[in-house]
Image (cartoon, helix red, strand yellow):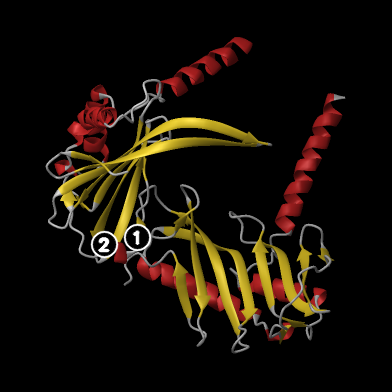
């Protein structure tokens, strides 16, 4: 009986370890996995206003993918959760945020260049003397959107750990952030 | 020794079964007319029907049951916002000390003016509003039911939250998700006493 229990415990442990394959967008080798997840779980032909990739803060590990779209005069957003593999119910958005906005198809978002652009962003930081050797720069957020002409561009954030302050039982982690924009012609600009 | 143990377990089991069955008949709830009558009896037994109150709130025991667990009334007393509540578990009317000082005296109505029969009507109307839009839900029950005196008109307004079970695992545009099966909808009456959905049915509204 005891043996069975231990075995079950080990099995459970293995199962839970297996499912925590982290998916870091900045790694080139993860792009294929990401494309497979999208092909399998999202409708590639869907017309969306934005396609968002959100990671757990200061880890770069992808947590969810969300997008928003128009249906029968209403705007909705849906979120696909990476670890639970569940696509959320549609949640209604305020229509005023979508005035004059243009859509793009999910399959037209240039996902394959994310890792390359991350490396380029680091280069920009280096050129501007902002890059610190001992720090990790986490790609915690990436979003594809369209400009006024309907051209796809992207905004993304690189976060880096600064310090942790403790007051009583409260722990506070401070981090810095560099915001980049990838223009429709794929060129990068540092926003801040 | 062993048989005595089993006998005790068995009799305890039967007793629980008996208690749970017998209390089924007069369960206080908004979902049935019998439940409404039980609630009305409890109100008249517990509170003075002429007592002036600003609002009354009914809370269910939990999200899976429709039986009312607690009834709270609010009224001004000695310039303080006072709340008393009857709890079905304790079987008592609790009168905690009022602390919140009122800036102005709220409009009130006598307890007898709060028409509990209307709650059942509105409950059924709410189900009709949901089912007019979608057939994805079943097993409707009240999470909480709130009747309050409108501070401008002095009229009694209703607002309530319904718990429902989603029939399938399919994704839905309706209701507020609490968990995979439990979805919530909210309703309230307008000035004309017409019931409107305030949350959960607006997916394709302008």
- Secondary element at tag 2: helix
A155 relative to A58 in the view: left or right: left
Please state the chain letter of the residue tagged with numbered disc 2 in the rendered image.
A
A131 relative to A15 in the view: left or right: left
- Position of residue B167 relative to residue B111, above or below, is above
Mark in front: 2 vs 1? 2
Residue at point 70%, 85% (across, down): B108
x then y, percent, for residue A100: 20, 64
Name the mark on residue A93: 1
B116 relative to B90 in the view: left or right: left
- Secondary element at tag 1: strand
Question: Which mark is first along the chain, 1 or 2?
Answer: 1
Quadrant where the C terminus of chain A sits is top left
- Position of residue B83 relative to residue A145, above or below, is below
- Position of residue B35 relative to residue A42, above or below, is below
- Image quadrant of residue A27? top left
x then y, percent, for residue B10: 78, 38
Quadrant where the N terminus of chain A sits is top right
- Dot 2 and dot 1 within a common chain: yes
* Residue B115 shows in this picture: yes
Name the mark on residue A98: 2
Residue at point 74%, 77% (across, down): B102
Please state the chain letter of the residue tagged with numbered disc 1 in the rendered image.
A
Residue at point 73%, 69% (across, down): B72
Q: Are marks 2 and 1 in contact (CB under 8 Å)?
A: yes
x then y, percent, for residue B180: 46, 47
């Amino acid at each position: 009986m005891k043996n069975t229990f231990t075995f079950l415990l080990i099995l459970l442990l293995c199962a839970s370890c297996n499912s925590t394959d982290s998916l870091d967008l900045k790694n080139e080798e993860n792009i294929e996995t990401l494309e497979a997840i999208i092909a399998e779980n999202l409708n590639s032909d869907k017309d969306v206003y934005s396609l968002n990739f959100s990671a757990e803060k200061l880890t770069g590990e992808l947590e969810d993918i969300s997008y928003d779209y128009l249906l029968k005069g209403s705007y909705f957003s849906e979120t696909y959760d990476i670890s639970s593999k569940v696509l959320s119910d549609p949640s209604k958005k305020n229509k005023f945020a979508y005035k004059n906005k243009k859509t793009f198809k999910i399959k037209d978002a240039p996902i394959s260049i994310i890792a390359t652009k991350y490396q380029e962003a680091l280069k920009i930081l280096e050129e501007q003397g902002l890059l610190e050797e001992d720090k990790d720069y986490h790609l915690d957020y990436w979003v594809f959107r369209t400009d006024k002409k309907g051209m796809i561009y992207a905004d993304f954030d690189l976060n880096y750990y600064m310090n942790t302050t403790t007051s009583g039982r409260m722990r506070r982690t401070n981090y810095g952030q560099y915001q980049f924009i990838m223009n429709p012609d794929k060129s990068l600009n540092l926003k801040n | 020794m062993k048989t005595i143990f089993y006998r005790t377990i068995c009799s305890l089991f039967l007793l629980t079964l008996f208690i749970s069955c017998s209390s089924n008949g007069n369960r206080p709830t908004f979902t049935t007319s019998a439940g409404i009558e039980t609630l009305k009896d409890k109100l008249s037994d517990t509170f003075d029907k002429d007592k002036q109150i600003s609002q009354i709130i009914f809370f269910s025991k939990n999200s899976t049951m429709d039986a009312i667990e607690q009834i709270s009334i609010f009224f001004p007393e000695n310039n303080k916002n006072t709340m008393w509540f009857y709890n079905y578990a304790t079987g008592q009317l609790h009168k905690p000390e009022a602390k919140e000082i009122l800036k102005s005296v709220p409009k009130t109505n006598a307890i007898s003016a709060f028409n509990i029969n209307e709650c059942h009507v509105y409950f059924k109307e709410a189900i009709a509003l949901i089912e007019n839009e979608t057939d994805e839900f079943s097993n409707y029950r009240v999470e909480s039911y709130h009747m309050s005196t409108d501070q401008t008109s002095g009229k009694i307004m209703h607002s309530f939250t319904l718990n429902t079970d989603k029939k399938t695992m399919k994704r839905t545009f309706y209701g507020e998700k609490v968990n995979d099966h439990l979805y919530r909808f909210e309703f309230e009456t307008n000035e004309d006493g017409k019931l409107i959905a305030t949350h959960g049915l607006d997916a394709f509204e302008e």
